[in-house]
């Protein structure tokens, strides 16, 4: 085992790698409770999603550990689960079973383009500025959902949204959780988001806002309510007209966001660990194969797209340098399957601070956008603001990809526009035509 993971080369050992794996798990364990909470809004069974989340995270992380041998963990991604629920299901009116099918298809496409080495071409085709804008826009969208779940932002007939009742007990609890999480994060506690959720849940139980769980350890929730649902009534679906166009955009968006989210996370964590050689990541294909395989498997079990987690950097900071770190994290996700009774204490008010903080972290890419260039700033700005304002990640991406070629052509910078961007321009024009 130590030879396979090259412990000697990386000057590490079982103890250091195990502690790093535990650190990574604690930093991202919040997804076990946040993901079921988000997907349950789409009508999915919360217990089944909990199991699917743990299983897909375990499978993806174990494949990453054994095949790619990197200390990088995977799980259903924040932003992608929000797109699944609030855009695809609630906004576009697509059944969650069909949304799972879209996730499955995007995973299969991801596997194909990984095996054929098309990844680099696609990455180079999309301007970096639009990638930054997409990440930031998704961050604002997630934060907006968190503020709504907390009761801090509420609907208003006159102004669309307004400040909620800040004396409402559930809102006070969410605000308390946000303050606690911010304190932990600023002080540098690894796993600050997870610990913030734990403290918030305990506080809610103490003051009587949240009921006590029946236990801490219990049986694994059945995955039958969601398992295989991606294929249940495909034969009954009318694929003509608007639905086909919607599904095409949904698949492309799942693919786009996951593609660049994973690529960016892999590069960032690998660079921190010292794996980058000549500006390239060795075994990058294997890393992306872990992500795409877990996405398709997760869709079969019943969860949204699986992606690499930036929280893996906490494990790297703790000394993790090999795939054994990921193996430990993956095994801990399997162990976590027995803690499903805790789902009842993880209410919207408990998960809201996590959504807000993750949104802040994703919005940090705003600083990388060249705001002094209007031809860049306009499509980037439309991408960012359209996501929370239209309650649709796909709409934000579509607007950015439509306006980018226009502003660049007007600026006389035809040579900077990749041919693929023209194709996407027409794809998203058709998308808005279908919506109309």
Image (cartoon, rainbow, N blue to C red):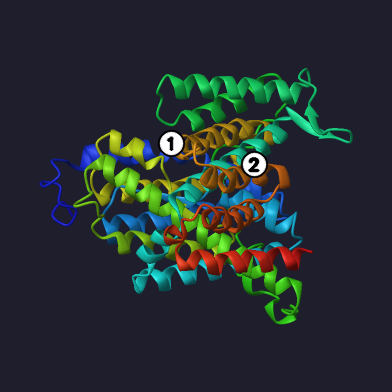
Q: Is 33 in front, or is 391?
A: 391
User: In the picture shown, does residue 256 fall above or below 32?
Assistant: below
* Badge 1 element: helix
Q: Quadrant of the C terminus?
A: bottom right
Horizontal and vertical percent for residue 289? 37, 64
Q: Quadrant of residue 142?
A: top right
Q: What residue appears at the point 53 percent right and 24 percent down from the top-left corner?
A: 181
Residue hosting label 2: 385
Distance between the alpha carbons at the discs numbered 2 and 1 = 29 Å
Neighbour class for label 2 at 10 Å: few (<14), some, many (≥20)?
some
Residue hosting label 1: 27
Neighbour class for label 1 at 10 Å: few (<14), some, many (≥20)?
many
Q: What residue appears at the point 65 percent right and 46 percent down from the top-left corner?
A: 387
Along the horizontal axis of the image, is 271 left or right of 306?
left
Dot in front, 2 or 1: 2
Horizontal and vertical percent for residue 70? 28, 51
Q: What residue appears at the point 22 percent right and 38 percent down from the top-left corner?
A: 15
Q: Quadrant of residue 144?
A: top right
Q: Quadrant of the N terminus?
A: bottom left
Horizontal and vertical percent for residue 51? 55, 54
Q: Is 312 in front, or is 359?
A: 359
N-terminal label among 2 and 1: 1
Horizontal and vertical percent for residue 425? 59, 64
């Amino acid at each position: 085992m130590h030879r396979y993971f090259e412990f000697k080369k990386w000057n590490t050992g079982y103890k250091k790698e195990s502690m790093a794996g535990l650190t990574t798990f604690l930093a991202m364990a919040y997804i076990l409770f946040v993901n079921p909470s988000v997907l349950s809004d789409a009508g999915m069974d919360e217990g089944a999603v909990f199991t699917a989340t743990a299983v897909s995270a375990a499978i993806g992380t174990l494949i990453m550990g054994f095949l790619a041998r990197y200390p990088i963990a995977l799980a259903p991604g924040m932003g992608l689960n929000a797109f699944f629920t609030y855009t695809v299901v609630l906004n576009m009116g697509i059944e969650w079973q069909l949304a799972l099918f879209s996730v499955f298809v995007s995973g299969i496409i991801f596997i194909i383009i990984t095996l054929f080495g098309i990844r680099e071409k696609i990455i180079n085709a999309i301007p970096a500025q639009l990638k930054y804008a997409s990440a930031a826009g998704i961050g604002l969208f997630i934060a907006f959902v968190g503020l709504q779940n907390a009761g801090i932002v509420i609907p208003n007939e006159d102004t669309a949204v307004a400040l909620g009742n800040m004396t409402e007990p559930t809102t006070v609890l969410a605000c308390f959780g946000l303050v606690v999480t911010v304190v932990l994060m600023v002080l540098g506690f690894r796993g600050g988001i997870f610990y913030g959720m734990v403290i918030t849940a305990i506080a809610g139980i103490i003051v009587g806002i949240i009921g006590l769980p029946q236990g801490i350890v219990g049986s694994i929730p059945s995955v039958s309510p969601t398992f295989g649902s991606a294929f249940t009534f495909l034969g009954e679906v009318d694929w003509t007209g608007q639905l086909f166009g919607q599904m095409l955009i949904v698949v492309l968006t799942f693919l786009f966001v996951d593609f660049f989210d994973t690529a960016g996370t892999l590069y960032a964590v690998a660079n921190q660990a010292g794996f980058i050689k000549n500006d390239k990541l060795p075994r990058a294909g294997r890393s992306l194969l872990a992500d795409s395989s877990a996405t398709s498997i997760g869709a079969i079990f019943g969860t949204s797209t699986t992606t690499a987690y930036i929280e893996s950097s906490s494990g790297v900071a703790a000394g993790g340098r090999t795939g054994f770190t990921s193996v430990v994290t993956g095994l801990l996700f399997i162990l976590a399957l027995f803690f499903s009774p805790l789902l009842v204490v993880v209410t919207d008010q408990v998960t809201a601070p996590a959504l807000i903080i993750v949104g802040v972290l994703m919005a940090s890419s705003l600083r990388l956008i060249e705001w002094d260039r209007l031809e860049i700033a306009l499509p980037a700005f439309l991408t960012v603001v359209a996501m929370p304002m239209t309650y649709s990640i796909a709409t934000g991406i579509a607007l950015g990809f439509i306006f980018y070629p226009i502003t660049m052509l007007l600026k006389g910078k035809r040579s900077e526009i990749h041919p693929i961007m023209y194709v996407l321009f027409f794809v998203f024009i058709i998308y808005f035509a279908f919506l109309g």
